[in-house]
Amino acid sequence: MGNKAVFVDRDGTINVDGPYLSDPDKFEMYSGVGESVKKLKEDGFKIIVMTNQSGIARGYFTEDVLSKIHERMKMKFSEFGVKLDGIYYCPHHPDDDCECRKPKTVLFKKAIKEHDIDVNQSYMIGDKILDVCAGQKIGVKTVLIPEAHSRNEFLSNKNEWKCVPDYVADDFMKAVVWIIRTRNYNLNIQ
């Protein structure tokens, strides 16, 4: 049996989603994310960030700048005693039709192999339906956290969703509470 993991989207899930974050100093983690990820780590989950970063292909920032943003993100998590297990990103434009851009799953398959992940014990947390679809394609349970500023409109269009998440959370902390409860429930019935 492999490791259990939580795959986490970055922009709009871990941090405030601005248009093409290109300045490490503007990386702003949502309240409660650090503490919540620490709970997941304490429960034995690997934490793997999966992010589409088409700003590189669009020329808005370089891979070097993205690396600095990820260093800042890792530093923010370290303030909570958390070390991320992996960060995987797609640098391509949506029109490139690459295999690594969510909702496609090449990066997930790479992470699963490199970290010996058991998908039956694993989860995906994201703010977009494409995160949910990617998670479902690889066989993990999925949690959707619609961004607060568009939540009501987003939820009112459920009938248009291509994929339906296992759970819709108000925020990251509630997503983690659900994951831990679900996991403990499943352990108790086995």
Image (cartoon, rainbow, N blue to C red):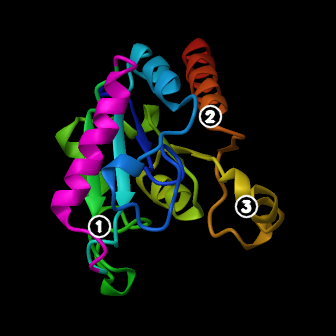
Q: Distance from label 2 to label 3 (Cα)?
A: 18 Å
Counting residues from the start of the chain, the first of labels 1 and 2 encountered is: 1
- For mark 3, what is the residue? 150
**Left or right: where 127 falls relative to 3:** right
- For mark 2, what is the residue? 175
Residue furthest toward the bottom?
A: 95
Of helix, strand and loop, which mostly describes the magenta segment?
A: helix
Please, is residue 40 above or below residue 160 in the view?
A: above
Residue 137 locus on image (x, y percent): 45, 58
Q: Distance from label 1 to label 2 (Cα)?
A: 25 Å
Is 64 one of the magenta-colored residues? yes
Quadrant of the rendering where the N terminus is positioned = top left
**Left or right: where 111 falls relative to 48:** left
Residue at the image point whose x is 27% and y is 72% from the top: 56
Residue at the image point whose x is 68% and y is 68% from the top: 161
Counting residues from the start of the chain, the first of labels 2 and 3 encountered is: 3
- For mark 1, what is the residue? 100
Please, is residue 71 above or below residue 88 in the view?
A: above
Mark 1 is on which residue type?
Cys
The segment highlighted magenta reads: 59-81
How would you rate the neighbour count of disc 2 (Cα within 10 Å): few for under 14, some for 14-19, many for 20 or more? many
Is 40 one of the magenta-colored residues? no
Mark 2 is on which residue type?
Ala
Per the rendering, the mark at residue 71 is: none
Residue 53 locus on image (x, y percent): 34, 65
